[in-house]
Image (spheres, rainbow, N blue to C red):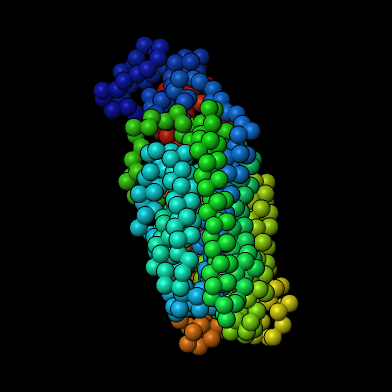
Amino acid sequence: ITPTLQKPAVVIGNVAPLQSLSNGSVHITLDPKTLEQELPPPDEKEAMLPGEQNNEALETRLYWRRFAVLAVFSLYSLVNAFQWIQYSIITNIFMDYYNVSSIAIDWLSVVYMVAYVPLIFPATWLLDKKGLRMTALLGAGLNALGAWVKCASVGPGLFWVTMSAQIICSVAQVFILGLPSRIASVWFGPREVSTACATAVLGNQLGVAIGFLLPPVLVPNTADDKDLMGHNISIMFYGTAGVSTLLFLLTIFVIKDRPPLPPSKAQAVLSTGPAEDYSYKKSIINLFKNKPFILLLVSYGIMTGSFYSVSTLLNQMIITHYPGEELNTGRIGLTLVVAGMFGSILCGIWLDRTKTYKLTTLIVYVLSFIGMVVFTFTLNLGNLLVIFFTAGVLGFFMTGYLPIGFEFGVEITYPESEGTSSGLLNAFAQVFGIIFTLIQGQLTTDYGPLSGNIFLCAWILLGIVLTALIKSDLKRHGVNMSSINKGQAVSSSDFNFHLPHQTSI
C-alpha cells in the first residue's frame, strides 16, 4: 500500500530509510513485527472502555443481599400503590362518607400523577447525585408519613386532611417508581436483570391488586351507619400506617447504594468512569436527542396512562352496568392486576433469555389493544364471568408491558442513568394518565363507559404504530456480551485504515 502523505508527516515505530520521490511524497517500509508491536493507534486510549486504560480486568460478583434489597423495595412500593387505589375502588362509599362528588374522589388518584410530573426531575437528580439509599429512604419515609396523616382524616368533614395525606403519598411515589431498573442494573447480573426489574415492578402491581381486593372487604357499604363506616375506614388506615412504618425501618437497615463489586460488565464499565464527568443536564439533553427513546416515551405513556385510567375508573364502569357489585368490582380489579403480574414475570424471563426487546414490546402492545377492544364490547353483556375473563386478558398484557418498557428504555439509552430514563418514562405515563383519566371519566359520566373505552382504544392503536417505528439498538446488552478486551472494545470505525500482516507503506 503506497499512500501519499502530506508534509510534514509523523512516523511512529522503526522505519527503513526514507526515499524521497519527485512529487514530494515519501516511501516508507515497515517491518511486519514492528507493525504488530509498535504501531498502536494514537487515540487507542480514548477509544478503549473505562477501566481498560490501566489494563485492569473488570471484576464482577453477585451478592445474596440483592434479594433482600429487591424484597424490601417491592414491599414498600406495594404499600404506596395500595394507597393510590384504595379510594377509587370504593368511590361510591367515600363519596357518601365525605359528601363529595365522584370527581373529587377521582382526584385522590389523579394527584399521584399530577405530583409526579414536576417532581421527577429533582427526584432523578437526587438519585444520580445521592444514590439509591437516600432515594429509597425518602420514598419509604414519606409513604409512612402519608399513611399516618390519613389516620387523622377519619371524619365526614375531613376530606381536606385525606387529600393532604394523599399528596404526601404521591410525593413518596416520585422516589419509588423510577427505582426498579436502577435496582436491577446495579444489583443483578446480565442474565437476571430483566427478571429483577419485572419483580420490582410486580411489587407495585401487587399493591394495586391488594388495593382492589381489601378496601371493599374492610369498608363495606354501610350507608345507613356513618359511624360504622368511619370505624371501618379507620381500621384500613391504621393497618396501612403500621405496615408502612415497619417497611421504612427495614429500608434503613437493608438498602444500600450498590454492592462492593458490580454485578455485570456494563456496570463495571460505568463504575470506572470519572464521576466528575457526569452532567445531569447533559444526560437529559442526550435522552431527548435519542429518537428511538422519544418514540418509546410516547408509546409507553399511552399504554401506562391507559392502565392508570382503567384502574381509576373501574368502579364507575362496573357499577354503571352492575349496581351494588362493589365487592365483585374489587375482585375484577384484582384479576386484572394479578394476571398482569404473571405477564410481567413471564415477559421478564423471556427478555433475559432472548433479548428480543422490540419484538416483545410490539407483540405485547398489539395484544393489549386486542384485550382492550374485547373488554370494551363485552362490558355490557350482563355476565360478570365474562368481565372477569376479559379483564384478566387485558391485565396480563397491559400490566405486563410495564417492565418491558423500562428495560427497553435502559437498553437503547445506555450508558445514560437508568433512573433518569425510567423517570422520564414514568413522567410521560403520569401526563397521559392525567389526561386519559379526566377525559375518559367525563365521557363515562356523560355518555357511558363505552365511549370512554373507545377513546382509549384509539390511543392504544396509535401506540402500536409508534412502537413499530422504534429502532432497536441494544447498547447495554452489547457491552455485556463483549469480552472487554482491547481487540473487541475498540471499534474499527475509530481508525482510518487497517494494517494487514504483510504490509509495505
Closer to the camera in the image, 319 or 478: 319
Locate the N terminus and report the quarter of the image it occupies. top left
**x and y percent of residue 449 in the render?**
55, 82
Closer to the camera in the image, 32 or 394: 394
Mark yes or no: residue 110 visible: no
Mark yes or no: residue 195 visible: yes
**x and y percent of residue 383 in the render?**
72, 82
Closer to the camera in the image, 316 or 190: 316
Quarter assignment of residue 116: bottom left
Locate the C terminus and report the quarter of the image it occupies. top left
Query: Which residue is rendered at x = 55% and y = 36% of the image?
Result: 254
- The extreme right residue here reads 385
**x and y percent of residue 335 in the render?**
68, 67
**x and y percent of residue 468 in the render?**
54, 63
Query: Which residue is rendered at x = 61% and y = 54% of the image?
Result: 202
- Judge from the rendering whether residue 62 lies leftward or rightward of residue 97; answer left or right: right
Relative to 252, say whether 446 is above or below.
below
- The extreme bottom residue here reads 447
Relative to 94, say whether 85 is above or below.
above
Query: Which residue is rendered at x = 49% and y = 32% of the image?
Result: 269
